[in-house]
Structure formats: C-alpha cells, structure tokens
Image: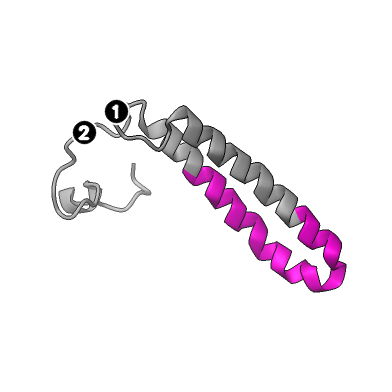
C-alpha cells in the first residue's frame, strides 16, 4: 500500500530471540494445560479483586473483610475441587 511504511524482512519477522518460530501460532496445546490455565486464572482473579479491596477496607470495615473471606473461600473450594480431580498431577 502506498501509505504504509516500507518494511524490511527483519522488521516483518516475529521476535523470538532471533530464531524462526518452530510451530504455527494457531497450533493446539495438549489438553493437560487447560486445568493449569484455569487454576492460574482463579489466582489471577483473586489478585485482581484484592487490590481495590485494600483501598475500601478502611471505609467499609468488617463487612469488606467478611466479603473478601467469602470470596477467598469460594476460590479455595475451586482449588480443592481441582486438587481432588487431579489437576495438579502432571502425569
């Protein structure tokens, strides 16, 4: 296109430490990665909600603490379920 800047082959390649990619970007992952991903997302959501919670605890008080422990209890129940189902077992 006449509006796009000219690119050399070095600029157009994806950056991966200077090497060409070994797989296609849309390649499939093994099914055992999905439970690990779900567990990571559970802990990621926990941190996402704990940062704003710290700011409102002084204003709201005990109710905010009770709600956070309820939230953490639900996440912990999910982790216990994943553990029972063998999501932490790699083989």
Q: CA distance from mark 1 to mark 2?
A: 7 Å
Q: Is residue 56 left or right of residue 25?
A: right
Q: Is residue 33 left or right of residue 82?
A: left
Within the magenta stretch, is there residue 53? yes
Q: Residues within 10 Å of mark 2 (few under 14, many from 20)?
A: few
Q: Residue at 66%, 56% (x, y): give it.
A: 49
Q: Which residues are magenta?
A: 40-67
| Residue ID for mark 2 | 23
Under circle 2, the secondary element is loop
Outermost residue toward the left in this view = 19
| Residue ID for mark 1 | 27
Q: Nearer the viewer, residue 27 or 41?
A: 41
Q: Residues within 10 Å of mark 1 (few under 14, many from 20)?
A: few
Where is residue 33? Give x, y as percent.
Answer: 37, 34
Q: Residue at 23%, 53% (x, y): give it.
A: 11
Where is residue 87? Give x, y as percent.
Answer: 43, 33
Q: Quadrant of residue 26?
A: top left
CB-based contact (under 8 Å), mark 1 and mark 2: yes
Within the magenta stretch, is there residue 79? no
Under circle 1, the secondary element is loop
Q: Nearer the viewer, residue 30 or 87?
A: 87
Q: Is residue 57 above or below residue 81?
A: below
Q: Nearer the viewer, residue 52 or 80?
A: 80
Assign the magenta stretch its main secondary structure. Answer: helix
Q: Which mark is residue 75?
A: none
Q: Is residue 26 above or below residue 57?
A: above
């Amino acid at each position: 296109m006449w509006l796009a800047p000219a690119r050399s082959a070095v600029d157009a390649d994806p950056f991966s430490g200077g090497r060409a990619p070994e797989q296609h970007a849309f390649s499939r992952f093994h099914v055992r990665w999905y439970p690990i991903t779900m567990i990571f997302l559970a802990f990621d959501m926990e941190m996402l909600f704990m940062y704003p919670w710290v700011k409102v605890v002084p204003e709201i008080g005990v109710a905010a603490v009770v709600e956070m422990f309820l939230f953490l209890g639900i996440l912990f129940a999910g982790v216990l379920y994943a553990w029972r189902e063998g999501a932490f077992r790699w083989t």
